[in-house]
Image (cartoon, grey):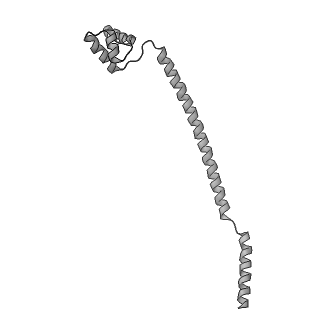
Amino acid sequence: MSTLIILLLILSILLFIISFFQKDHSTNLKKEVEDLSMNLYQETYQINKRIKVLEEELLVDDQLMKKELSKSAKPVVNEILKNQVIALFKQGLTVEQIAKQSALAQSEVKNVIADFLDQ
């Protein structure tokens, strides 16, 4: 019985020593996760950078379009509103009445009527 205990003790000491020389697989896994995390952060940073550039370009394009629209002599009027203004004009309403009913400025109503009469 004592030989069995001694044998088990020697075996346990031997296994304990061997465990120090075994490779630790968790360190490899930790490194892989860390590398993956760094790649993910880098890609996210690059995507955010590209989004900012696109937003700036869209903002610049939007500002240019607003400037072009404000520079144009005639404001853009919806085709449905044009038809409504022309119908009201044919009914004999005044420019002021047409402007109230169509929610357009009087100058816009005059422009629509002038375009209609020029045709």
Q: Is residue 26 above or below residue 101?
A: below
Q: Position of residue 82 (x, y in %)?
A: 33, 17
Please, is residue 80 above or below residue 119 in the view?
A: below
Give the x, y percent position of residue 90. Answer: 26, 11
Residue at the image position 68 percent from the left and 65 percent from the top = 24
Q: Is residue 30 left or right of residue 66?
A: right
Residue sticking out furthest to the left: 91
Can the viewer see residue 119?
no
Q: Quadrant of the C terminus?
A: top left
Q: Across the whole image, how many numbered discs are drawn on residues?
A: 0
Taking the view exactly as shown, the residue that stands out farthest to the bottom is 1
The picture quadrant where one finds residue 95 is top left
Identify the residue at image location x=60%, y=37%: 49
Which residue is pictured at 36% across the width and 20% down the height?
A: 78
Is any atom of residue 60 visible in this view?
yes
Examine the rendered structure and indicate whether residue 31 appears above or below residue 14: above
From the viewer's side, name the closer residue of 91 and 42.
Answer: 91
In the rendered image, which quarter is residue 56 located in?
A: top right
- Judged left or right of residue 100, residue 7 is right
x, y percentage for residue 10? 74, 82
Measured from the top left, where is residue 45 in percent x and y?
A: 61, 41
Give the residue drawn at x 27%, y 15%: 87
In this view, the residue in front, 110 or 8, is 110
For this rendering, which residue is in front, 64 or 82? 82
Q: Quadrant of the N terminus?
A: bottom right
